[in-house]
Structure formats: structure tokens, C-alpha cells
Image: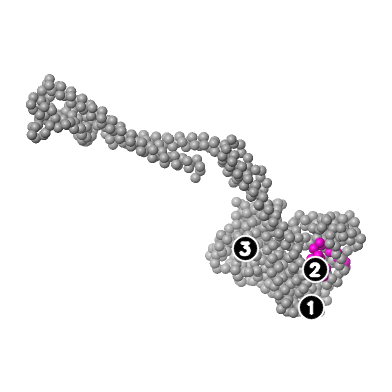
Amino acid sequence: MRLLNQSLTYLSSAFLVIIGVWSILFYINIKDEIRDSIDDGLENNKLLIYQKIKADSTLLLQREFGGNNFEIHPISTQKVPFRKDVYKDTLMYRHNEDDLEPVRILHATFKHQNNYYRLKIISSLIEEDDLIEDASYSIFWLFIILIACIFIINNFVLRKVWHPFYEILNSLKNYRLNTNNSPISVTTNTKEFIQLQDASNALIHHTKKAFIAQKEFTENASHELQTPIAIITNKLELLLESDHLNHDDAKTISEVIQMTDRLKKLNKTLLLLTKIENKQFIQQEGISINTIAKAHCQQFAEYTAFKHIEIKIEEAANVQVQMNDSLADILISNLIKNAIFHNIEHGKIIILITHQMFTIINTGAKTALDSKTIFNRFTKNESKTQSTGLGLAVCKAICDLYQFKLNYQFIQNEHHFSIHFKN
Amino acid sequence: MKILIIEDEAELRETIQKSLLKEKYTVETAHDFTSASDKITMYNYDCILLDIMLPNGNGLDLLKHLKQLGKSENVIIISAKNALDDKLKGLALGADDYLTKPFHIAELTARITAVLRRKYFNGKSEVQLGNCTINIQERTLKVNQHDVHLNRKEFDILNYFSLNKNRLITKSALAEYVWGDHIDQADNFDFIYYQIKNLRKKLEDSNAEMAIETVYGIGYKLIEK
């Protein structure tokens, strides 16, 4: 969630609570105030009625509310003791509304010429449900308008205030260690943003230094290893040609040579990976994937015939890709070799070349490989200890370099490797 | 045949020298830029093995020097760098081949033999071994003037053997030659074995005066009968 919207969420929940509590208190207050003033009015009415009764005793015959807002009933003192005035809420039938509506009623007892009477005066009350409904509506709209205002203000003001932050964030997102970007520089007077920018630049500087050091180390180490490995291999090979060797010694020497070969291959492949990741393959040209695929299948024709592996190439399109020719070669040949060497006897390989896509499907182990680790370095099939476990890592590195998508799937006992050339 | 090895690493220089002496070449060595420069100025060689990274100088400059002297020595560059740039530069400056360290002895022998073949065949592309004629251009084998059909890989292997006559070729070297670089050699040896078996049978069936010997079960050797 974006920063702007996050503050909005917090604000709106706070507003919801504040407005909610406030409106309840406000409603209670208003209601009390209304009751008070109605009660005052009723009391005033009572006093007026008392005065009028003194002048005109026919009012004492007012038994029903009728058109007036009071009624008077004589009572005996035994039956009803003299009471203080009582105000009550009650419901009364209203003709115009054809319904029971709330009214405020005043029960008072008074004495007139030694007779006791009970007086009831009514006054219509506010209809509470209507009030609540209206008030809720207004409050709801108030809430919406507030949130909308804050949203707009956030977007206009905060966006402006936070602009340097987003600029720094974007620079960091687009930063690539192996390209020569200039340090992040945004124009701002905000202290925090300047600090953030300085911290980011310091971090980038450190990372870059470490990256370069690591790069140089891998490269140098691999280079420096080449000569000793060459000496070991060549000396052993010469030793094998010696006449005084017995069979067992020769066997041991040959095993050492094979190990040295593995070392050599590891070293070469690591060097290749480093070079790919360092983007040292700059030259690009239009490469026909179809041509490369066919050439490599041809290259392994004798081997596949020997293993009785059937290779089929289905070309639905001619795929042209802009990339380095050696890397294209390595990418496609590694996938084809992978499909061949991890295949079974009498197995099959299908190469599908469709629009911007190269897929190679092969039979092989009956269980799926772990698609999460398969492209990692040194992931290898346990039965193939001679393998360096770097072949697919090289493919992945090449695809990453050109932002191709390399995928693995296991469908119906077949291994599918596919490259999408358009990202 | 006179060969000059220009390489600063003593152990490697001596190993290469030993191997080349087996081929009955006359071998001289130089360990740095100055001594190498002196030697190529004073003497003529049939082939020069040249390391690019040398103490007090760059091997590529030696190539330029050779060109200035008007000498057309065959130069094979041996370098720890597999950089395409160096390779192209070297080849552009007149080097005949480029070999990346580390390499198999068999590979080096093959490259040298190939270079010398090109130099002294004068356009001829046939190699005679006993009663066998290998035509490199047309990729054919004739035994007693009769064609023997070989498939692509079989011919490659035979050619490699002919470049390493009487020398041991380990299975790893052969596998690398047959499959090229960047390959895990997991399952390759049985295929090599299969190809050798077929090749042997074809040579035997056609009464060829050469045979492929197994050496300790770890490699092969081509011998003339």
C-alpha cells in the first residue's frame, strides 16, 4: 500500500471513531435540550391554564384533548394523593400521520374550589427515528466529504512534499551495480530526504566497491588457476606415456587426470558465468535460433543414434534474436546437451520453435526436478557425479542478461524447458 | 622441424618441451619477451608457441615484430585468457591458431601437427599412413585405394589420431575434442568407446596397416603396423 493511502486509512478510521462518538454525544445533548424547552413550554401552558380556569371554570369540563392540548379530570384526594408534576414521553394517535407518534405529556394535580383535578398537557415531540435517520445521513456525508478532502489534499500537497522521496526510491530501483550510474541526486531542502540520499549513496558506494572486488577476485582466481591446472594435466599425460608404468599406476593417474578435467571445466564455466554477469559479451547480432538448434542437433546426431534417442524439430516460426553469437550458441547447445545427456535409451526429444519461443521437451527421469533450484549453481543429478552442475546456471545467466524468461515444467513424465525471447 | 616455445612458466615450458621432443622436433625455449625477441630475430623456426602474457612485454608485440621482420613463421598462441578480443587480435596479426590454457597434450600436438601439415603439404591435403590415405579436405579414408566409409565423428576421431600418431590420447582429451567445450562429460565415454570400436572394426575389415591400441584402458594410441 502506498504511503499516501496508508495515512489515509489511519485518518479515516480515526475520523470514523471521532465522528461516531461525537455524533452520539451531540444527539444526546440535542435531545435533552429539546426536552427541556418542551417541558418549559408545558409548564408555561400549565400556568396559563390555571389562570384561565380562575376566570372561566368551563375549562374544567375539558375531558378530552380534542382540538386542545390539555384535558382535565376531577379526582378524589383519597384515590390519588397530591402529586408533584410529572413529565413523561408517551405515544399518541395522530390523525394526519395515521400512526402513533411520540408526545411529551405533563401530569399535574391542582386544587380548584376544594375539588381536586388532574391536568394532562401534551406537546408533540420530535420524531426520534426521523431525527436519527437525518442526522446519520448528514454525518455519513460529512465523513465522505472529509475523506475526499483529505485524499485530495494528500495527493496534491503530500505528493509534492514527498516528491524527493519517490525520486530517490526510483533511482534506487533502477540502480544496477554493473553499470556506471552517477550517484543519486535530487533537489530538496528537506533534511530527512537529504540524509536518505546521502545514506543511499554511501551504501551504493560500498556495495559497488565490494562488487568490483568480488568480480576481480573471481576473474583473477580463475585466470591464475588455468596455468597450474595446465601444468598438472600435461605432466600427468606425459607421465602416462612413460614406459615404466604399471597398469594400476596408470589407472590412478588417469583418474587424477579426469578430476583435473573436472576442475578445468568448473573453472572455465565459472569464468564464463562471471563474464556473462559482468556483461563482457557486448557484441550483438541478429541470430537465427532455428539455425543454431538445427546445427547442434546435427552435431549430436551420432550420439543420439547410439543412444537411440529420437530428435524432432518442429518449426512454427523463424525466431530471430538480437544477442551475442557465442552466448546464443552456448545457451541453445547447453539445453540440447542437457536434454540428450539426461535422457534415457530409446527416449525422445522434441524441439518446438514458435513465435518468440524456444521449447525443448525430453524424456528422462520420471520425477519432476525442483524448478526452484534447478537453475542454481551446482545443482546436479546425484547419479551424474561427473557433471559440473553449472550447465543450466549458465543458461539462466544468459537469459537474465538479455531478460529472456527461462522456465522449467514437468508435464506427463516429460521435462519441458522453454525460453521466451520477448519479455 | 624446429619449434620455439615462448612461455614464462618454467614447469609448463618444460612439460611442453618434453612432449615435443617425443615427436622428434628440435625444441628451443624462451622465458621472457627479450630472450624471445632475440631468438626470433636471429633464427628461423617452423613453429612458435607463444604465450601472450610475458614478463617485460606482450606476446602480441612479438607477433608484430615477426611481421616487421618479414618472417612467416607459424605461430600458435597459448593463453590463459579465453577473451575473444585477444584471439581475434592474435589471429589478425598473423597467428595460425589460438589455444586456451589449460589444454591436453594431445590437443597441442594435434594443433602443431596441423599447422606444420598446412605449411609443408603445399596445398596437398592427404596424409599417408601405411596403406591408408586420409584426405582431410574431402574427409575420406582410402585403404589400398579402396574407399572406407566413415561417419562424421569416426572421421574426426581418426584425423585426431593421425595428428597424434604414436602418442597416447586420453579418453578425456578425445571426449573434449569430439564434444567441444562447455560440456559435462557425464555419459560420453561409452559413446567414445563405441565409436572407437566401430572405427577399429572398419580398419581391420579393410586390412589397414594401422590400428588403434588401447593403453591401460585409459586412452588410445594410433600405431602403424
**Total tally of numbered discs in the picture:** 3
Left or right: B33 as drawn, with respect to A122:
right
Q: How far apart are marks 1 and 3 (CA)?
A: 39 Å
Q: Residue at x 68, y 63 (%)?
A: A266
Per the rendering, the mark at residue A243 is 1
Q: Mark 2 points at which residue?
A: B15
The amino acid type of the residue labelled 1 equals Asp
**In front here: B189 or A217?**
A217
Q: Quadrant of the N terminus of chain B?
A: bottom right
Q: Nearer the viewer, mark 2 or mark 3?
A: 2
Magenta residues, start to end: B1-18
Q: Name the residue under label 3.
A: A378
Q: Do the residues labelled 1 and 3 touch (CB within 8 Å)?
A: no
* Residue A71 in which image quadrant: top left
Check the image and report above or below for A218 versus B159.
Answer: above
Q: Which residue is drawn at 67% across and 50% down?
A: A209
Q: Residue at x 60, y 45 (%)?
A: A200
Q: Distance between the residues labelled 2 and 3?
A: 33 Å
Mark 2 chain: B
The amino acid type of the residue labelled 2 equals Thr
Q: In which quarter of the image is the C terminus of chain B?
A: bottom right
Q: Residue at x 48, y 42 (%)?
A: A6
